[in-house]
Image (tube, grey):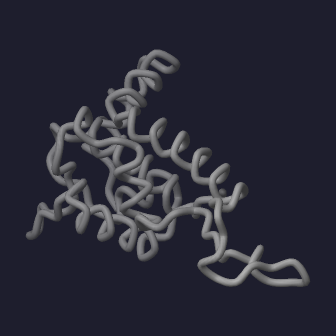
Amino acid sequence: MRMGEGVEWALHSCLNLAWAQDGGAVTVARLAAYHDLPAAYLNKQLQALSRAGIVTSVPGPRGGFRLARRPEDVTLMDVVTAIEGPEQAFRCTEIRQQGPHGEMPGNSRRPCAISAAMRRAELAWRRELAARTLADVMSEAERGAPGVPGRVRGWFATASA
């Protein structure tokens, strides 16, 4: 399974918004500048996060984006689903019904073993992402680099974009 780069961008943006939260809303231009990303494309990711209720858009001259929920209330799966959509990663098209030994549609007595294995794997992947929140990732990042939250907050408070 390969996720688009928008997932990474969205997750980092959510972390930066969480750390910069006390400073007010953050513009797309500032969020994009922090990681040298194209603002127009990042804006599409932020709009998807907004539609999912993960971030909120603040209008006006001091506007931008803020987290709409506490980091404890946003799972990694929430972000992945907002960006990639809710569709399953593996789609069984029942090709076993084709070819020289294919069965007639509807005559299969057992579910496709490959489909069942892939669904179990995806379920495990989704459960893991659903069990981890932005707060979990923030804590892990802060343990690895204790000064990051303050530096991020300071950069967004003083940076001009």
Foreground pick, 64 / 158: 64
> Looking at the figure, which quarter contains the N terminus?
bottom right
Q: Is residue 22 above or below residue 30?
A: above
The structure residue drawn at horizontal position 46% and vertical position 26%, both measured from the top left corner, is 141
Give the percent coordinates (x, y) of residue 158: 28, 45
Give the percent coordinates (x, y) of residue 73: 23, 38
Q: Is residue 33 above or below residue 40?
A: above
> Looking at the figure, which quarter contains the C terminus?
bottom left
Give the percent coordinates (x, y) of residue 6: 50, 63
Foreground pick, 7 / 13: 7
Q: Is residue 43 above or below residue 32?
A: below
- Answer with the quarter of the image where residue 40 lies: bottom left
- Answer with the quarter of the image where residue 99 lies: bottom right
Give the percent coordinates (x, y) of residue 55: 23, 56
Foreground pick, 150 / 68: 68
Residue placed furthest toward the left: 60
The structure residue drawn at horizontal position 45% and vertical position 51%, both measured from the top left corner, is 34
The structure residue drawn at horizontal position 20% and vertical position 62%, both measured from the top left corner, is 64
Residue placed furthest toward the right: 100
